[in-house]
Image (tube, rainbow, N blue to C red):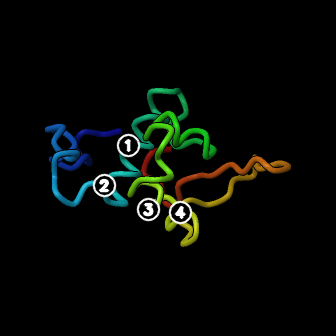
Amino acid sequence: MESKKTKFKYLLGLWKSLPEYPTREDVVYELNSYLVKDGRPGGDFTAQTFNSVFGINWKKSKHGVLIEEMINDGTFNESDKTAGTKKWYRIKDNEIK
């Protein structure tokens, strides 16, 4: 991720302390950060990936509500890798490729 395009709140590392945390933008930033560290910049991910990024109880938190909304509204698109019951996703219009 390019630091010139990264918002100030992420560069300072204070986004998690802001009262509106988490936002949809925060979810995308944290997911992208994880995927870059995992060697998959802009890559595909599954719901299991959210366990690694947000912890095993993410479904019961505000993260879960936001992620569900983002799947339903197409922010997270189903990927070509989806097979059987395991769904794979990609971030729509992701700046990280």
Q: According to the image, label 2 marks what residue?
A: 22
Distance from the alpha carbon under mark 3 to that under mark 4: 5 Å
Secondary structure at badge 1 equals helix
Task: Decide which of tag 2 and tag 1 comes sooner along the chain.
Answer: 2
Distance from the alpha carbon under mark 2 to that under mark 1: 10 Å
- Which of labels 3 and 1 is toward the front? 3
Secondary structure at badge 2 equals loop
Callout 2–callout 1 Cβ contact below 8 Å = yes
Callout 3–callout 4 Cβ contact below 8 Å = yes
Task: Decide which of tag 2 and tag 3 comes sooner along the chain.
Answer: 2
Q: Amino acid at mark 3?
A: Leu
Q: Amino acid at mark 2?
A: Pro
Which residue is drawn at the image coordinates 45% and 37% (left, top)?
A: 55
Task: Decide which of tag 2 and tag 4 comes sooner along the chain.
Answer: 2
Total tally of numbered discs in the picture = 4
Task: Judge the density around disc 2: few (<14), some (14-19), many (≥20) Cα neighbours within 10 Å.
Answer: some
- Which of labels 4 and 1 is toward the front? 4
Callout 2–callout 3 Cβ contact below 8 Å = yes
In the drawing, does residue 38 fall left or right of residue 17? right
Q: According to the image, label 1 marks what residue?
A: 30
Distance from the alpha carbon under mark 2 to that under mark 4: 14 Å
Question: Residue 1, position in %: x, y?
Answer: 35, 38
Q: Amino acid at mark 4?
A: Glu
Q: Quadrant of residue 22?
A: bottom left
Q: Quadrant of residue 54?
A: top left
In the drawing, does residue 37 fall left or right of residue 77? left
Residue 81 position (above or below residue 92): above
Q: Amino acid at mark 1?
A: Glu
The tag on residue 66 is 3
